[in-house]
Image (cartoon, helix red, strand yellow):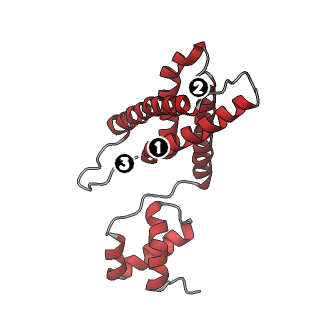
């Protein structure tokens, strides 16, 4: 049985192998091919891929990311429902935590995803005030936009804090490779 692949197939699989999401058979075929083909090895960048994480770990990571996202949305709803009441100042703590959860779920994309989700959840929460659900009070549109802007600043502060902590404690340089370890 011939287990050789063409350069075209190898080049199609290279991004998957580099990202560590290709299965072990594909990874073995690509590594065998680039050992013989200098052109594909150059495209690969000459670096050996890290062993791919087991699929169970990848599924667990996806599940954890979705849990972070759901907790972020619940935190936004809870914080926004406090806006018209006496608990509004709890949002000074809630929104930065929401930002951290957003960073854990979306990494650097949280800078724009968290405010977008905040706007969506804010308008939904305000609409629920019309329905008199859960004691949520209705705000006029100018007040709602003002509070959402303030909360977005607090949430972005949480995102920045999480980014800085991740940068400070989460990455170390591999010696001589310029590649970051995780």
* Residue 110: assigned label: 1
Q: Which percent across, then down, holds residue 42?
A: 31, 75
Question: Sequence-wise, which precedes: disc 1 or disc 2?
Answer: 2
Secondary element at tag 3: loop
* Residue 27: assigned label: none
Residue at image point 46% right, 33% down: 149
The residue pinned by badge 3 equals: 181
Give the label, 3 or 2, closer to the camera: 2
Q: Is residue 4 above or below residue 70?
A: below
Give the label, 1 or 2, closer to the camera: 2
The residue pinned by badge 2 equals: 79
Secondary element at tag 1: helix
Q: CA distance from mark 1 to mark 2?
A: 18 Å
Q: CA distance from mark 1 to mark 3?
A: 22 Å
Mark 2 neighbour density, 10 Å: few (under 14) some (14–19) many (20 or more): many
Dots 3, 2 in contact, CB < 8 A: no
Q: Residue furthest left?
A: 176
Q: Is residue 16 left or right of residue 80?
A: left
Question: Sequence-wise, which precedes: disc 3 or disc 2?
Answer: 2
Give the label, 1 or 3, closer to the camera: 1
Dots 1, 3 in contact, CB < 8 A: no
């Amino acid at each position: 049985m011939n287990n050789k692949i063409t350069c075209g197939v190898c080049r199609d699989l290279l991004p998957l192998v580099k990202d560590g999401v290709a299965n072990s058979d594909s990874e073995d075929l690509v590594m065998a091919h680039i050992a013989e083909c200098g052109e594909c090895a150059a495209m690969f960048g000459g670096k050996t891929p890290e062993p791919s994480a087991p699929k169970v770990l990848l599924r667990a990571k996806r599940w954890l990311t979705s849990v972070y996202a759901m907790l972020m949305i619940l935190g936004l709803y809870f914080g926004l429902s406090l806006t018209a009441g006496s608990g509004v100042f709890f949002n000074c703590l809630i929104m930065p935590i929401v930002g951290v959860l957003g960073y854990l779920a979306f990494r650097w994309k949280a800078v724009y995803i968290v405010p977008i989700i905040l706007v969506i959840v804010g308008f939904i929460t305000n609409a629920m005030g019309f329905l008199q659900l859960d004691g949520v009070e209705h705000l006029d549109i100018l007040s709602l936009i003002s509070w959402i802007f303030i909360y977005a600043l607090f949430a972005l502060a949480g995102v920045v804090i999480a980014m800085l902590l991740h940068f400070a404690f989460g990455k170390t340089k591999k010696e001589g490779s310029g590649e970051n370890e995780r």
